[in-house]
């Protein structure tokens, strides 16, 4: 695959041309518009709608290569005068390539760990469902156990009561039989009775006595059957208690095992989620480093366009040392350039510019006249515009809600180039404003009364 820089009329360092192409192949395929060396107009049209981070990689790494009409009017510096800058560009290209590889590795690691975390989540959900079901079964069986114990106790009480009634009735019947037997030993008395009582009346008395005996026999028989039935029920209730107790013990053990599996699955889920979160943070950091490296690369390429201001100036004639405040009427600075705790990543980081708070939609003005060398979405910066002003100077405008310029467009000082927003890694609407000299970020306040010093914490990639 050819890189758009291959047909560039300037003699660019061979290593840089190779690395610029390699960035496109490692991180993302080159867009169709970059396959033609004379397609600058297509590039400027497509770059406005490019929102993917990896497409932004190519936009920053290769989109600056072809000359626009504004650049073509200016004489090309001799290659011998740009050797040092070309080496810087080659080093920046190496850094961008390495950052792109790290992004790919971090993305692969994150994808793998995220998959493991999702698998652990499903395992935990299954273990939790099994544990809950086992617990419900154990609770239900324990309820059955206590009900069986209660039934057994009731049956035992009923059996004891039936046994008592049977014993009392049997004792009464036996006593009656003994009384009859003991009282009837005197045949004389019986004869007297037979002589004095009417035969018909005697027959009735004997019939009543026999009926009474039969009733006692029937009652004893019924009581005996009732006692035997209650004894059988008690035996069944006791057997049920034993069976339910065994089942309850088994289900309780299963409940404990399921609960233990649930705990293990929850721990595995925690470990996998922690690993995935760590991989995600690493991926964010790698993407941030890649974005920063590519912005630096684009700034260096912009510097190469106008490294010799004595022999090359823009049609506007604006000197790169003269800048206008980019957000008119908003002078408060919420974050200065230098080391700080990143408000999004919540860790120590380097702020390459200043943050100027303003409402969403507030106009953003070009700090100086120049050429738009990048306009699109870049990870971290959100919607970003990079303008080259000559003399190695470039200004960057990040987190825009709208970009109103296109790559290759010549803009004038104080021209509205976009609108304030909160895209990218941002906690609220503001303009992130950078000033770069030969790719190195400088404190923008150095152009507004402060000393012009490089951002010390910034690391070149």
Image (cartoon, rainbow, N blue to C red):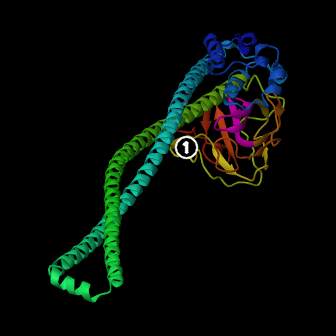
Q: Dividing the picture into quarters, in which one does residue 179 lie?
A: bottom left
Residue 17 left/right relative to 205: right
Q: Is label 1 in a helix, a strand or a loop? A: loop
Whether residue 439 is visible to the viewer of this picture, yes or no, is no
Whether residue 419 is visible to the viewer of this picture, yes or no, is yes
Would residue 461 be counted in the magenta stretch?
no
Along the viewing direction, whichever of 306 and 399 lies nearer the viewer: 399
Q: Which residue does the image show at 67% across and 44% down from the upper left?
A: 432
Image height check: is 387 above or below 364? above
Residue 262 position in % (x across, y down): 43, 43
Image height check: is 10 above or below 321? above
Residue carrying label 1: 345
Image height check: is 2 above or below 337? above
> On the rendered image, what quadrant is the N terminus found in?
top right
> On the rendered image, what quadrant is the C terminus found in?
top right
Residue 47 left/right relative to 19: right
Residue 135 position in % (x across, y down): 43, 50
**Part of the protein shown in magenta:** 375-400
Along the viewing direction, whichever of 169 and 320 lies nearer the viewer: 169
Q: Which residue does the image show at 75% across and 41% down from the upper left?
A: 367
Would residue 395 be counted in the magenta stretch?
yes
For label 1, the crowd category at 10 Å Cα-Cα, with few meaning under 14, some 14 to 19 and many 20 or more, is few
Residue 33 position in % (x across, y down): 79, 18
């Amino acid at each position: 695959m050819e890189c758009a820089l291959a047909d560039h009329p300037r003699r660019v360092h061979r290593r840089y041309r190779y690395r610029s192409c390699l960035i496109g192949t490692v991180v993302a395929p080159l867009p169709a518009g970059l396959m033609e060396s004379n397609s600058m107009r297509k590039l400027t049209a497509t770059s406005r709608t490019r929102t993917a981070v990896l497409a932004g990689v190519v936009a920053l790494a290769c989109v600056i290569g072809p000359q626009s009409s504004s650049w073509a009017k200016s004489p090309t510096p001799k290659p011998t005068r740009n050797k040092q800058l070309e080496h810087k560009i080659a080093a920046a290209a190496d850094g961008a390539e390495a950052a792109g590889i790290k992004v790919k590795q971090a993305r692969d690691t994150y994808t793998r760990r995220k998959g493991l975390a999702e698998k652990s989540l499903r395992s935990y959900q299954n273990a939790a469902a099994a544990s809950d079901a086992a617990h419900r079964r154990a609770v239900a069986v324990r309820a059955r156990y206590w009900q069986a114990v209660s039934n057994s106790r009731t049956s035992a009480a009923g059996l004891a009561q039936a046994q008592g009634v049977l014993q009392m009735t049997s004792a009464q019947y036996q006593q009656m039989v003994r009384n009859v037997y003991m009282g009837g030993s005197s045949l004389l008395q019986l004869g007297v009775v037979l002589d004095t009582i009417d035969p018909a009346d005697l027959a009735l008395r004997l019939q009543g006595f026999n009926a009474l005996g039969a009733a006692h026999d029937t009652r004893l028989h019924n009581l005996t059957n009732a006692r035997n039935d209650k004894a059988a029920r008690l035996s069944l209730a006791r057997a049920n208690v034993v069976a339910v107790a065994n089942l309850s013990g088994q289900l309780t053990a299963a409940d404990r095992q399921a609960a233990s599996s649930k705990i293990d699955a929850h721990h595995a889920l925690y470990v996998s989620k922690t690993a995935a979160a760590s991989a995600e943070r690493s991926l964010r950091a790698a993407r941030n480093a890649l974005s920063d490296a590519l912005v630096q690369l684009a700034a260096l390429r912009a510097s190469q366009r106008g490294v010799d201001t004595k022999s090359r100036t823009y049609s506007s004639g604006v000197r790169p040392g003269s800048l206008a405040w980019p957000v008119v009427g908003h002078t408060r600075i919420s974050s200065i350039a230098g080391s700080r705790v990143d408000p999004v990543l919540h860790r120590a980081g380097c702020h390459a510019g200043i943050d100027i708070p303003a409402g969403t939609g507030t106009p953003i003005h070009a700090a100086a006249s120049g050429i738009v060398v990048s306009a699109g979405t870049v990870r971290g910066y959100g919607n970003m515009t990079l303008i080259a002003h000559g003399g190695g100077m470039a200004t960057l405008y990040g987190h825009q809600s709208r970009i109103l310029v296109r790559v290759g467009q010549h803009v004038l000082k104080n021209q509205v180039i976009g609108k304030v927003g909160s895209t990218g890694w941002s906690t609220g609407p503001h303009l992130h404003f950078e000033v770069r000299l030969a790719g190195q970020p400088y404190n923008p306040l150095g152009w507004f009364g402060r000393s012009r010093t490089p951002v010390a914490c910034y690391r070149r990639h």
